[in-house]
Amino acid sequence: MRGRAAGWFASAVLAVWLTAGGWLAGQVAHNEMAPPVVHVDHGANSAAARKAHYVVLVSLDGFRWDYAKREGAKHLLEIGKEGVWAPEGMLPSFPSLTFPNHYTIVTGLYPEHHGLVANSFYDPVKQARYAISDTKAVTDGSWYGGVPLWSLAESQGMRTACMFWPGSEAEIAGFRPTYYAHYDEKISEEARVAQVLEWLKLPEAERPHFITLYFSEPDHEGHEFGPDAPETRAAVRKVDGLVGKLKAGLDASKLPVDLVVVSDHGMVKVASEWITLDQFADLAGFETAGPLLYGKTEADRERVYTALKKAAPEFKVYRRKNVPGDLHFNQNEREGDPVVIATGPYAIRARGPEAGKPDRKPTAGAHGYDPALMPEMKASFFAEGPDLVAGKTVLPFENVNLYPWLAHLLGLHAPKTDGSLNVLAGTLRDDGAEPVQ
Ligand code: AMP
Ligand code: ZN
Ligand code: ZN
């Protein structure tokens, strides 16, 4: 009842912009831009929500499972020591790309169940394209399935905030976060941390209990220079420092905050030049997106499948319905048909650049691959807080299991998803029983 009323309110209110000149500006160095925050008024936290603990969910894009130990990232390792750590990594969902995995983390659904099956893809039913660089698509809730954690919390009377997160700029399952910002790489990492800490200084009624924070490093350096390059190693140490600043601020707040630091995937050194599928098969009439192939007719799909079948050892091709089940990549039309899967760290694309346009070499590092074939795809997981056991390590687990666990930390009732609370129940100070509200 409350949820439905608040949902209506969310779509009816006019978002209020707090600009760089506003009250936030004083919180960051004056030459830095404070994030322009959109405020959607959902009313005050409910009485139950006020009693709940806080979760700050941080993503370090492309922070491979072994980076923290390799660089001696002291703040992250400290969080792991004082709380919970997956020393052998967390398993990303397939494909191990940024948007599919960030959105899996906040929905508990495999990409083919939430709908973001790649960073860029085609939808044969809508006959439209989604791309992370397309603001119109990114902010259009009709592309997104599932109930993201912020929408779940808002529907249960709890306020939320996103300092960037894939999906956070769209209305999904009837809600937006109460506070969010449009993605802008120019907003410095320090300003992002400052914003999160500011949100936690709001009066209890307005203070968000679930907060996301996103950094695009060390993914960027990993792509440009490769996972072992000095630039990538420096970026790892830099984001560790940012986590340290955040942690210090959270400690100073004296609030009961569970800090959860994850990454979306790892990074591997690319071992090929471009492998361009239309050199092996005639893709006339196909829509394509990256390596994805959308055949219009059954005859076209079968023809291209046959042509690619023995084309090269760097990939395997399947009719979509036959993609191995453990990849959870055989049910959604957005995945295309046939489906090409790399057998190693190879740069695969459907087509080269358009005629007259220059080609670019593949990047030094890449991800997107099957973590079972390439352990370099494994992501990171560290968490510490009042609800978590200290000094606990966990074996690699699938990132779909974060959702019921995060919902539990917040005291929310979670819908059924692809994840299970049992997987991480051993990290909880309570027994993982259903919350009473
Ligand atoms: P990729 O490594 O290709 O999977 O994607 C990583 C890129 O996604 C980063 O370099 C960011 O620039 C971009 N990105 C991350 N979050 C967002 C967002 N919320 N909106 C748009 N782009 C984003
Ligand atoms: Zn990423
Ligand atoms: Zn990347």
Image (cartoon, grey):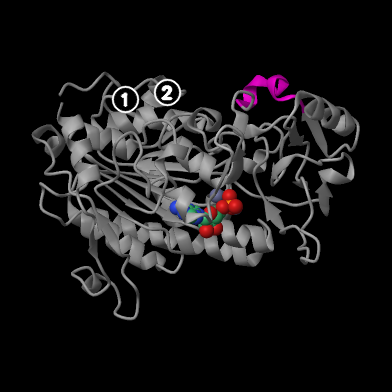
Report which residue position mark 1 lands on: 414
Label 2 Cα crowd, 10 Å radius (few <14 / some 14-19 / many 20+): some
The residue that mark 2 highlights is 417
Residue displayed at 82% across by 48% down: 276
Some atom of ligand 2 lies within 8 Å of the CB belonging to the residue at label 2: no
Residue drawn at (34%, 22%) of the image: 415
As drawn, 337 above or below 178? above
Q: Is residue 402 left or right of residue 264?
A: left
Image location of residue 152, percent across then percent down = 29, 33
Q: Is residue 254 above or below residue 9?
A: below
Of residues 381 and 195, the one nearer the viewer is 195
Which quarter shows the N terminus? Answer: top left
Residue 151 in view: yes
Could you tell whether 414 is left or right of 61 in the image? left
Q: Is residue 212 above or below residue 231?
A: above
In percent of width and height, residue 390 lies at 34, 37
Within the magenta stretch, is there residue 321? yes
**Residue 378: percent from left, percent from top:** 59, 40
Q: Position of residue 197 (x, y in %)?
A: 25, 58
Give me the C-alpha separation between circle 2 and circle 1.
8 Å
Q: Is residue 254 left or right of residue 105?
A: left
* Three-letter code for the amino acid on which mark 2 is drawn: Thr
Query: Residue 319 got which mark?
Result: none
Residue positioned 19% across, 49% down in the render: 13
Crowd band around label 1 with a 10 angstrom C-alpha radius: few (<14), some (14–19), many (20+) = many
Pick the quarter of the image with the C terminus: top left
Q: Magenta includes 59?
A: no
* Residue 7, quarter of the rendered image: top left
Tag 2 and tag 1, C-beta contact below 8 Å: yes
Residue interval drawn in magenta: 318-328
* Foreground residue among 97 and 424: 97
